[in-house]
Image: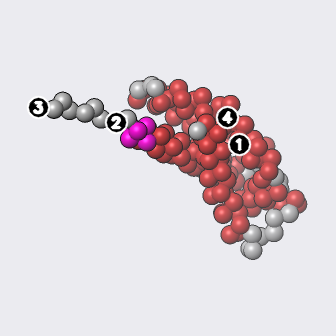
Amino acid sequence: MKLLKVLLPVLVDFGVFWAVVYFNMPHHSMRIGEIGNGNLYSLMAYFSLFWGLLLVDGILTQYLIIIPLWNWVKHKGASGRFIAGACIALVCILFAGGLSYVIWLPEDGYRPLLSFWWYMTEIQAVYWMVNFVVLYLLDRKRTSTDSELVEPEAEPAT
């Protein structure tokens, strides 16, 4: 079950991103020269060219960080879930801001920086939401099958 929790959420997320990139490929070429232009298509070119490396990174992140976090959050109350969600949101905002700043061209002004920052935050937030929904469904299915396996006690004959 642990292998399924590591692989399935990452594969579902990458399947969604692959579909977005695939359906946009006829309209835009996905070449290495597209990377670094600071727009949506440069991000899609990066994903389409380096998907294998990104997949390995996603699986390692899932195994080393997300599964332990998920197991911790499962046993905490609403305040633990809120703290974990706030930390994940903060990490998404900081990483999106850092990446946006790295590819931002200052001569273009602040509007492209803020636009790309918002877009990168959305991508990460969707990734983590899909990831946690898949983990929730896997755990819910496991607990429902575990409860079905327990046989009810027989009532005493009267």
Which dot, 1 or 4, sits closer to the camera?
Answer: 4
Q: Mark 3 and mark 1 in contact? Answer it, CB < 8 Å.
A: no
Which dot, 4 or 2, sits closer to the camera?
Answer: 2
Q: Is residue 129 visible?
A: no
Q: Residue at x 60, y 28 (%)?
A: 68
Which dot, 3 or 1, sits closer to the camera?
Answer: 3
Q: Could you say whether the residue bearing mark 4 is in a helix, strand or loop?
A: helix
Which dot, 2 or 3, sits closer to the camera?
Answer: 3
- Residue matched to label 2: 151
Q: Earlier in the sequence, mark 1 or mark 4?
A: 1
Mark 3 surroundings within 10 Å by alpha-carbon count, few (fewer than 14), some (14 through 19), many (20 or more):
few
- Residue matched to label 3: 158
Q: Mark 4 and mark 3 in contact? Answer it, CB < 8 Å.
A: no
**Residue 78 location, x and y as percent?**
40, 29
- Residue matched to label 4: 63
Which dot, 1 or 2, sits closer to the camera?
Answer: 2
Q: Quadrant of residue 30?
A: bottom right
Three-letter code for the amino acid on which mark 4 is drawn: Tyr
Q: Could you say whether the residue bearing mark 1 is in a helix, strand or loop?
A: helix
